[in-house]
Amino acid sequence: MRNLAFKAGTLARVCSRQQLPSVHASGAAVQQIQQKKNASSFDNPFRETQTTKIPSFDKYRNSGGESSAKVFQYFMVGTMGAVTALGAKNTVQDFLVNMSASADVLAMAKVELDLSAIPEGKNVIIKWRGKPIFVRHRTEDEIKEADETKWESLRDPQPDSDRVKKPEWLIMLGVCTHLGCVPIGEAGDFGGWFCPCHGSHYDISGRIRKGPAPLNLEIPEYDFPEEGTVVIG
Ligand code: FES
């Protein structure tokens, strides 16, 4: 009996010794799996220390939404367009001002004449823009004659009233409409002007009555700014 008990104890010790490696083997497998798990996950070395600091831009954000941003964009586009248009307008205006005639040239373009110095029935010739201007102080008879002429049948039909602003003052360009000679006053068959170059006769209204000239003597721009004064040009 005592021998049997000894054998049983021996057998138990042997079994326990044989099972121990398997227990040890299962513990090693668990460790290997845990190591694999740890090895598969990324271990950030900078996890504890944050090296990049991103600033906050909250105060720069538009809190008004999309509509307020569009209003601002439209305002900027409109303002820039207006400024550009104003600059272009000033540039073109400066260019045109530089290209236009200066004040002294404009002054030369107009001539003022004192009519009180011209007696009735007399001619005066003045120079305007390099051309002669005839100024005739017509008499009552000359006005009547010019007015009663049958102008409809003339070569260049024109009533006397269309050629004067005041009947007593006849103001014309002293250039023959044929080839540009200067006619002679108080001469010719019609008591007006005569061009000796090719024999053109103008009446007391400056209308062509005879000769090769095709048109009446030209009437320039003029005005009477005050009584007794005429400004030509
Ligand atoms: S230029 Fe006066 S008639 Fe010829």
Image (tube, grey):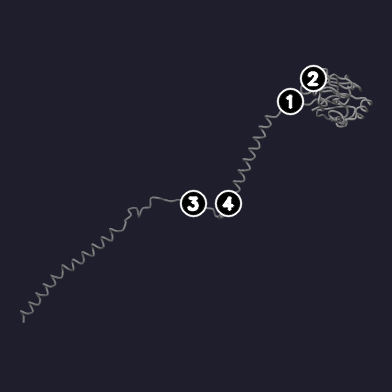
Q: Real-space Cα distance between discs 1 and 3?
A: 66 Å
Query: What amino acid is at disc 3?
Result: Phe
Q: Real-space Cα distance between discs 2 and 3?
A: 88 Å
Q: Is mark 2 within 8 Å of ligand 1?
A: yes
**Element type at marker 4?**
helix
* Disc 2: which residue: 181
Point out which mark residue 70 bears: 4
Q: Real-space Cα distance between discs 2 and 1?
A: 26 Å
Query: What amino acid is at disc 1?
Result: Val
Q: Is residue 152 left or right of residue 52?
A: right
Q: Earlier in the sequence, mark 2 or mark 1?
A: 1
Question: Residue 160 location, x and y as percent?
Answer: 88, 30
- Do the numbered discs 2 and 3 sit on residues whose CB atoms are within 8 Å? no
Please say if 77 is above or below 189: below
**Element type at marker 1?**
helix
Indicate which label's residue lies in the foreground, 2 or 3. Answer: 2
Q: Real-space Cα distance between discs 2 and 4?
A: 73 Å
Point out which mark residue 57 bears: 3
| Few, some or many residues within 10 Å of mark 3 (<14, 14–19, 20+) | few
